[in-house]
Image (cartoon, rainbow, N blue to C red):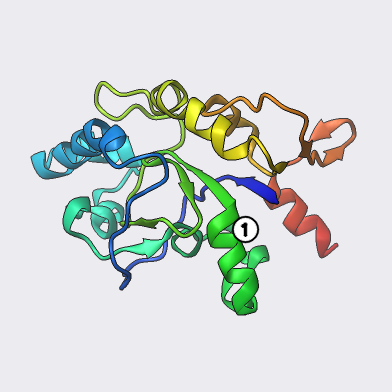
Amino acid sequence: MLKILFSPAEGKKAGGNVAKKELFGSNSAREGILSEYNAIIKRGDENEIKELFGFKKFSDCNPYINDIFNSPLMCAIERYDGVAYDYLDFNSLETEAKEYAKSNTVVFSNLYGPLLGGDTIANYKVKQGNDIGSFVPDKFYKDRFSYQLDLYLANSEILDLRAGYYDKFYEIKKPHTTLKFLKDTKTVSHWQKHTEAWC
C-alpha cells in the first residue's frame, strides 16, 4: 500500500464539527508540547503570541487564539489551506479516494507532529521553524515518533511530497520516491510550480 508524506500549510480553515479521536502514535506523547502551546495562548502576551504565530499585527492572531483542547476539530487533510491542498481539492474526491487519503497520508504538523490525514485537529498557528516555549518541534517529534513511523511505513511504498524543511521531522530509512521540481538547476517551491503551470 502506498503511503504519502505531506507538508502542512500556513493557512488553516476555521471551524470543525468532527469527533475527537486518538492521533497517530499517541496523544500522550504530544501532551507536553500541546500544553505549552496552550499556555502561551492563555497568558495573552501579545508579543509572545505574535512571535509564535509569525504575525506583525496582533489583530491577525485573533482567529487562532483558542483553547486547542476545547476547540472545534477537523480532519488534518481538510484543515490545511494552501497551494498543495488547493491542488489536492479534497472535497472533489470520490468517497473511496477521500478515505484512502485520510488513512494513508502522513502530514507533518509544526504543532502536532506526524498526523494521519484523518486525524482530528484544532485550528492553530505556529510559524515554520519557531520553537514552542522550550520545545523545538522538529527535534521533539523526530525523537519521539521516528520509531512509530518506521513501523507504520515498514511494509509500504512511500511517496515523499514534503517540503525539504520537514525532512527534519523524520528521516526515511528505506527506498522511496520523491519529487523535486527544478528551474535552472534550482529547486522551486510549490507556489512557483502553481504559477508556472498557468504560464
Judge the density around disc 1: few (<14), some (14-19), many (≥20) Cα neighbours within 10 Å.
some
User: At x 41% / y 65%, what residue is drawn?
Assistant: 13
Q: How many marks?
A: 1
44, above or below 81, in the image: above
The amino acid type, in three-letter code, at marker 1 is: Val
- Between residue 147 and residue 18, name the one nearer to us: 147
Residue identified by numbered label 1: 83
Q: Residue furthest right?
A: 184
- The percent coordinates of residue 4 (x first, y second) are 65, 48
Q: Residue furthest left?
A: 43
Residue 147 horizontal/vertical position (percent): 49, 26
Instruction: Determine whether, in the image, residue 12 is placed left or right of residue 152.
Output: left
Relative depth, front residue between 132 and 56: 132
Residue sitting nearer the eye, 10 or 23? 23
Choose between 106 and 22: the one closer to the eye. Answer: 22
User: Which element is circle 1 on?
Assistant: helix
91 over 115 or under it: above or below = below
> For this view, does 60 lie left or right of residue 114?
left
Residue 180, quarter of picture: top right
Q: Residue at x 39, y 30 (%)?
A: 130
Q: Where residue 101 sits: x, y (%)?
A: 59, 61
Answer with left or right where residue 160 lies relative to residue 57: right
Q: In which quadrant will I find the C terminus?
A: bottom right
Residue closest to the far front: 155
Residue visible at 26% across and 21% down in the picture = 134
